[in-house]
């Protein structure tokens, strides 16, 4: 007699089955309840029209439990369960998703340009990510630094890229990972200072157009899995979970100031 | 015949060293222009070849490539060192992101004041011993193959060897608990292109010293 091991049969037999979220086939994101490094992954999946689930830990003990579970290769998050694997390292995760869903260009050359553009965007978004960890007396100076970099190093490069490509996209003639992340970061910088795009007409145009793409438009609406910026309470939570100290902004800027 | 790739950077490791390793391991000859003055850097800026005003810059296939990770991915793909499919590429990305994080910590430590530099080195050795090297020892143990991914030489192997040698410069006995990594180190070092790169006179650069730090600070003004 063969055993029917289907979920229905097990449940019918009153056997409690530990249902893993991944049984639904959707990717599962493991992180805390905030943007951090996982936000770019949320954006990319959403833009690709891929539904995903999230397991969000809320304190240090839950994070420790995840580490003890042995699914984090370097004991770090983000971690994404997808296609039977536990992916770590944000870039590796993003590249896999981009390639899988056709958002990584159509040639090696296009891929190289996408990689260059997203590296720049990561540098800028890292600065914004660490900003809440500024020492209070350094907040104003750090904000000025971020805005200066955004408007003199990064935005000009992307404005030029759009101008040179003569398309509605950064690379080639269709939406790529670079476009999704550019919109994400534009909105983040605007949260630091409204009107920061004045002087960049093509970026303004890009922002409006890209926001209208149906999957992205949906992600931008309230109720989506997009996360808000950190408020004071959640900064406290983040510091507790990851054991961060105040003053980490300047400490980490050396990783971002220049490639040297 | 294809023109040789040309590398623009300081005469030291920094963020260009992993690129030198990859090209050398792939048996690709390359040229280098070393940044020694502010004027040289400003000329690169004016010529518009630095996307975000940053080096490394690698001119290859008619493109000015910047951002070391973008450059490394391009080269790995171009020279068939990136696995045979998306899943292998993913594993290579996860492994190289880890070893690159470790090596960047080492590169940055050179720019810190003496006390902080010592603390950084201690942390790096600890991370290598408890976070990174155990992962690779286990990978080799689990599949029993000679290379990290797909039973074939890849970018992941090159970069792991590079990272091992860099950490050994900080702590010679670092591999004492990792027998498979010791065997890996010997095996990969013996690959002819890599053996050549490890010999004196190659384009491999020495660890950063005071002079290197001074040049970088002067050129980039920080």
Image (cartoon, grey):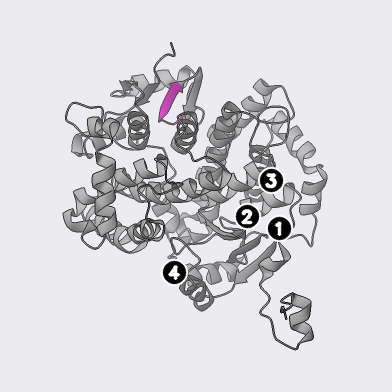
Span shown in magenta:
B53-59
The chain to which mark 3 is attached is A
Query: Label 4 vs label 1: CA separation?
Result: 24 Å
B15 vs A44, left or right, is left
> Residue B90 in the image: x percent, y percent?
53, 47
The chain to which mark 1 is attached is A
Residue at the image position 69 percent from the left and 45 percent from the top: A194
**Mark in the foreground, 3 or 4:** 4
* Front one among B120 and B46: B120
Check the image and report above or below for A193 versus A63.
above
The chain to which mark 2 is attached is A
Check the image and report above or below for A231 versus A126.
below
Residue at the image position 42 percent from the left and 60 percent from the top: A247
Query: Label 3 vs label 4: CA separation?
Result: 32 Å
Query: Label 2 vs label 1: CA separation?
Result: 7 Å
Q: Residue furthest bottom?
A: A14
Q: Which residue is mark 2?
A: A39
Which type of secondary structure does the marked residue at label 1 adopt? Answer: loop
Label at residue A226? 1
- Is tag 2's residue or tag 3's residue first in the polypeptide sequence? 2
Q: Residue furthest front?
A: A1
Is any atom of residue A255 visible in this view?
yes
- Is tag 4's residue or tag 1's residue first in the polypeptide sequence? 1
Q: Are marks 4 and 1 on the same chain?
A: yes
| Disc 3 packing (10 Å; few <14; some 14–19; many ≥20) | few
Q: Which residue is mark 4?
A: A243
A69 vs A212, left or right, is left
Label at residue A194? 3
**Labels 2 and 4 touching (C-beta < 8 A):** no
Which type of secondary structure does the marked residue at label 2 adopt? Answer: helix
The chain to which mark 4 is attached is A
């Amino acid at each position: 007699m063969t055993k029917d091991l289907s979920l229905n049969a097990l449940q019918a037999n009153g056997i409690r089955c530990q249902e893993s979220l991944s049984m639904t086939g959707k990717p599962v994101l493991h992180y805390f309840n905030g943007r951090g490094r996982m936000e770019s992954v949320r954006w990319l999946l959403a833009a690709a029209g891929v539904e995903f689930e999230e397991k969000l830990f809320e304190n240090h003990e839950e994070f420790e439990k995840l580490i003890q579970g042995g699914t984090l290769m370097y004991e770090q998050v983000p971690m994404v369960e997808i296609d039977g694997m536990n992916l770590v390292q944000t870039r590796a995760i993003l590249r896999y998703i981009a390639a899988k869903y056709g958002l990584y260009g159509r040639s090696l050359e296009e891929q190289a340009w996408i990689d260059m553009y997203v590296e720049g965007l990561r540098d800028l978004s890292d600065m914004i990510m660490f900003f809440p960890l500024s020492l209070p007396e350094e907040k104003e100076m750090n904000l000025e630094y971020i805005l200066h970099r955004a408007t003199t190093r990064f935005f000009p490069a992307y404005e030029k890229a759009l101008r040179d490509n003569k398309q509605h996209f950064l690379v080639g003639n269709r939406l790529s990972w670079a476009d999704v992340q550019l919109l994400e970061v534009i909105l983040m910088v605007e949260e630091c200072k409204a009107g920061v795009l004045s002087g960049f007409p093509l970026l303004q145009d890009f922002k409006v157009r890209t926001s209208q793409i149906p999957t992205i438009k949906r992600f931008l609406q309230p109720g989506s899995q997009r996360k808000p910026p950190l408020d004071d309470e959640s900064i406290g939570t983040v510091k507790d979970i990851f054991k961060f100290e105040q003053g980490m902004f300047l400490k980490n800027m050396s990783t971002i100031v220049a490639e040297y | 015949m294809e023109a040789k790739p040309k590398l623009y950077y300081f005469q030291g490791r920094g963020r260009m060293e992993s690129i030198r390793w990859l090209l050398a391991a792939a048996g690709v000859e390359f040229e280098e222009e070393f940044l020694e003055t502010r004027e040289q850097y400003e000329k690169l800026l004016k010529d518009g070849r630095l996307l975000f005003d940053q080096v490394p810059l690698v001119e290859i296939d008619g493109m000015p490539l910047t951002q070391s990770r973008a450059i490394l991915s391009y080269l790995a793909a171009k020279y068939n060192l990136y696995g045979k499919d998306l899943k292998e590429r993913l594993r290579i990305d996860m492994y190289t992101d880890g070893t690159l994080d470790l090596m960047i910590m080492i590169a940055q430590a050179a720019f810190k004041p003496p006390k902080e530099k010592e603390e950084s080195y201690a942390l790096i050795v600890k991370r290598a011993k408890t976070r990174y090297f155990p992962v690779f020892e286990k990978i080799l143990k689990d599949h029993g193959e000679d290379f990290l991914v797909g039973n074939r030489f890849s970018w992941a192997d090159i970069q792991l060897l590079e990272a091992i040698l860099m950490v050994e410069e900080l702590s010679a006995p670092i591999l004492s608990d990792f027998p498979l990594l010791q065997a890996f180190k010997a095996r990969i070092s013996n690959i002819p292109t890599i053996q050549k790169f490890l010999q004196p006179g190659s384009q491999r650069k020495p660890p950063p010293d005071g002079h290197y730090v001074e040049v970088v600070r002067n050129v980039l003004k920080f």
